[in-house]
Image: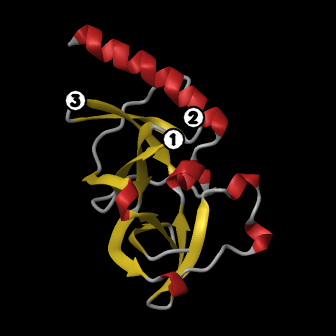
Amino acid sequence: MQSTKQAIFQLGEEEYGLDIMDVNIIEKYIQIEPVAKFPKNIKGIIRLRGDVIPVYSLRSKFGLEEIEPTDETRFMITTSNDIQIAYEVDKMMEIVDFESEQLYASPEIVQNKDTTYIKAITNVHDRLVILLDQNGILSDEEQEKVKIVMEKEVKKQNQTA
């Protein structure tokens, strides 16, 4: 693995990272509009600077209970498999540079088809951080459903504009 700069964020008591080169922007929480027929991990959409962006709940994906947004809730907007998406996170922590020798492969015991989003693990100030691959978070089924629903939402937005 090569060196990387990661945006470290918190979900519950755990910390995760996304490669800062994959993060388009980090936004404060704005109201989410619910949309019918989205997969369970998709909370709805946000409208940001003319874009319609689905909001993905990493809490739901990782089996954590949903919580009410706070002043620290953020959207990490990225592109996952050609889909612009906002990952809702509890708190943005920091941006950290890691050298390749600080990154470790995930333990074999947690490697399976449902955990392809785990790129590596590392340590930040004696805290375990799981580094994510944004292209592995959405399942194939989620990607297909999001594409279909988003096409309809964009058409709807264009008709009202």
Tag 1, which secondary structure? loop
Q: Is residue 156 left or right of residue 109?
A: left
Is there CB contact under 8 Å for labels 1 and 2? yes
Question: What is the number of the mark on residue 50?
Answer: 3
Q: Amino acid at mark 3?
A: Gly
Q: Quadrant of residue 90?
A: bottom left
Check disc 2 and report the residue beneath it: 143
Residue at point 50%, 67% (across, down)? 12
Q: Amino acid at mark 2?
A: Gln
Check disc 1 and report the residue beneath it: 81
- Mark 2 is surrounded, within 10 Å at the Cα level, by few (under 14), some (14 to 19) or many (20 or more) other residues, namely some
- For marks 3 and 1, the one nearer the N-term is 3
Coloration of the structure image: secondary structure
Question: What is the number of the mark on residue 89?
Answer: none
Q: Nearer the viewer, residue 124 or 89?
A: 124
The quadrant of the image that shows the N terminus is bottom right
The quadrant of the image that shows the C terminus is top left
Q: Amino acid at mark 1?
A: Asn
CA–CA distance between discs 1 and 2?
A: 8 Å
Residue at point 42%, 42% (across, down)? 85
